[in-house]
Image (cartoon, rainbow, N blue to C red):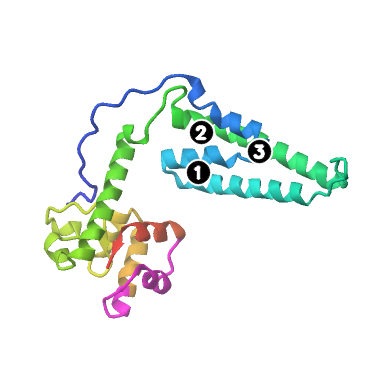
């Protein structure tokens, strides 16, 4: 058996953590003071700190919500004295902003704890699991740069083939042109039937994929499998 997980050093001593609940209070302040217009900013910050895809989706959603508020208030006509000339649009805009503000604060309450640890700043790299994931991603990027410079090293180092036990840590890459289905499934953390479908598609086209686009065109795969292949596949 082989272990496809990248081996990384144990995290060192943690850096001192800033105390005080106010460290995350700006999440609510910017949302309330801007009346929901800038509600996306805390979510983008949290997404960058925690590295979670669902938070990036939330951040994009609140960005679109902010654009919507700008548009609806921009198109609402005004009288010469500054009062609204369209009560319906004004009410819709006000209620929309209030809704975004309230829902945003509800989303931010648990999120602030996750980022700041209930009053203590929790750096992403302080979590050993996050540290391992970031280190593995860095190794994958480094290995891809190495392959671009020295493609002949792929076979010698066993890049994308952890089952060959060549000793090189590529961070969890997988060679979709040569790896067996079970190895693809293990490295990518996907279901074996999907990996077998990839291998079957490879055989059908003569044994060689040139890029991830060809794999995704030839083999019907669910989104979570496609994401893993984009992150880990080499050719």
Looking at the rendered structure, the secondary structure element under dot 2 is helix
Q: Label 2: how many residues lie within 10 Å, few (<14), some (14-19) or many (20+)?
A: many
Question: In the rendered image, which quarter is residue 175 located in?
Answer: bottom left
Looking at the rendered structure, the secondary structure element under dot 1 is helix
Q: Mark 1 and mark 3 in contact? Answer it, CB < 8 Å.
A: no
Question: In the image, what residue occupies the spot 33% across and 53% down?
Answer: 189
**Depicted 135 relative to depicted 191: above or below:** above
Q: Is residue 218 magenta?
A: yes
Whether residue 172 appears in this view of the structure is no
Q: Earlier in the sequence, mark 1 or mark 2?
A: 1
**Depicted 125 relative to depicted 182: above or below:** above
Q: Which is in the foreground here, disc 3 or disc 2?
A: 3
Whether residue 156 appears in this view of the structure is yes
The residue wearing badge 3 is 36
Question: In the image, what residue occupies the spot 70% across and 46% down?
Answer: 69
- Tell me how far mark 3 sits from mark 2, CA to CA: 17 Å
Q: Label 3: how many residues lie within 10 Å, few (<14), some (14-19) or many (20+)?
A: many
| Residue 220 placement (x, y as % from top left) | 43, 69
Figure quadrant of the C terminus: bottom left
User: Residue 40 or 158: which is nearer the viewer?
Assistant: 40
Q: Is residue 100 left or right of residue 169?
A: right
Q: Mark 1 and mark 2 in contact? Answer it, CB < 8 Å.
A: yes
The residue wearing badge 1 is 55
- Tell me how far mark 1 sits from mark 3, CA to CA: 17 Å
Question: In the image, what residue occupies the spot 18% across and 67% down?
Answer: 151
The residue wearing badge 2 is 111
Magenta region, residue range: 202-222
Q: Which residue in the rendered view is the most extreme toward the front? A: 80
């Amino acid at each position: 058996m082989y272990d496809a997980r990248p081996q990384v050093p144990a995290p060192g001593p943690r850096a001192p953590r800033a105390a005080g609940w106010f460290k995350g209070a700006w999440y609510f302040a910017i949302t309330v003071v801007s009346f929901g217009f800038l509600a996306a900013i805390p979510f983008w910050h949290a997404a960058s700190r925690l590295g979670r895809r669902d938070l990036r989706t939330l951040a994009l959603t609140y960005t679109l919500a902010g654009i919507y508020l700008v548009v609806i208030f921009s198109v609402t006509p005004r009288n010469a004295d500054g009062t609204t000339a369209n009560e319906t649009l004004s009410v819709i805009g006000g209620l929309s902003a209030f809704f975004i503000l309230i829902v945003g604060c509800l989303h931010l309450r648990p999120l602030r704890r996750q980022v700041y640890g209930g009053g203590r700043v929790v750096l992403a790299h302080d979590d050993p699991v996050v540290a391992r994931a970031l280190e593995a991603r860095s190794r994958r990027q480094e290995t891809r740069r190495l392959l671009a410079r020295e493609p002949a090293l792929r076979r010698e180092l066993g890049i994308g083939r952890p089952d060959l036990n060549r000793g090189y840590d590529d961070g969890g890459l997988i060679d979709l042109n040569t790896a067996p289905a079970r190895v693809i499934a293990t490295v990518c953390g996907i279901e074996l039937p999907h990996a077998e479908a990839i291998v079957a598609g490879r055989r059908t086209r003569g044994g060689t994929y040139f890029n991830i686009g060809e794999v995704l065109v030839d083999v019907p795969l669910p989104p979570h499998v496609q994401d893993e292949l984009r992150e880990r596949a080499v050719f």
